[in-house]
Image (spheres, helix red, strand yellow):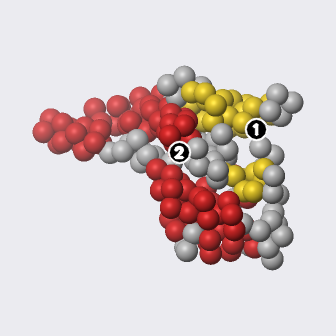
Amino acid sequence: MIIKKAQDRIVIILPTLGIVIKFPIIHFIFFLKFLKDAYQIKHKIRKWDYWKVMWRLSAECDFAPKALLFKGLSVNWNEFWFYQTTHNPFLQPTYFSLFGLVNIQKYGEPCQFEGKSFWNQIYNLTKGAAMKDGHHFENPANFSLYNGKLRILDYGSSKTRLIVKKYGDKIVTDFDPNYT
């Protein structure tokens, strides 16, 4: 068993069972700090405007109050829903989600590609679109090989899903593990 902590999720890796369990992290302390900072705004009108603007920000915006509370849940749920609705062969299967509170995904050994050749190939296969989501696409450890085909392990972000929708099939068919 291996436990890894990311920004918005805790991942328990169980290779012997062939699964990965993902739990959301709720940043409650940071949310309380946001509430305190918002409360300290001196003018009531400005305080209300600040609340409205901040609450309208997407849960994918790291400093938004919704993100502090719900980003991990949202990423888990979106990952499950995206796999269930597309069954894209580029996605590592996500078997189950309890409304984002817990996800169960098929285990895949993370890739260990060295150098820039991995990124160059991904960049070329996506016609540069991977640059819009470098966090997910630049790191080979976010991928695994299954029967010689590349699969992405973390795909809950909307940016990642857009790239997968457009280029996922191409990556699966054209990715060369021996590319240099």
The label on residue 86 is: 2
Mark 2 or mark 1: which comes first in sequence?
2
Front residue of this view, candidates 142 and 39: 142
Residue 165 picture location, percent across and down: 51, 56
The image quadrant that residue 46 belongs to is top left
Front residue of this view, candidates 65 and 14: 14
Q: Amino acid at mark 2?
A: Thr
The residue lying at 51 percent from left, 52 percent from top is 161
- Above or below: residue 92 compared with residue 40: below
From the image, tell me which residue sits under label 1.
107
- Above or below: residue 28 compared with residue 113: above
Q: Amino acid at mark 1?
A: Tyr
Q: Is residue 129 left or right of residue 50?
A: right
Q: Is residue 35 left or right of residue 143?
A: left
Observer-side mark, 2 or 1, equals 2
- Above or below: residue 31 compared with residue 86: above
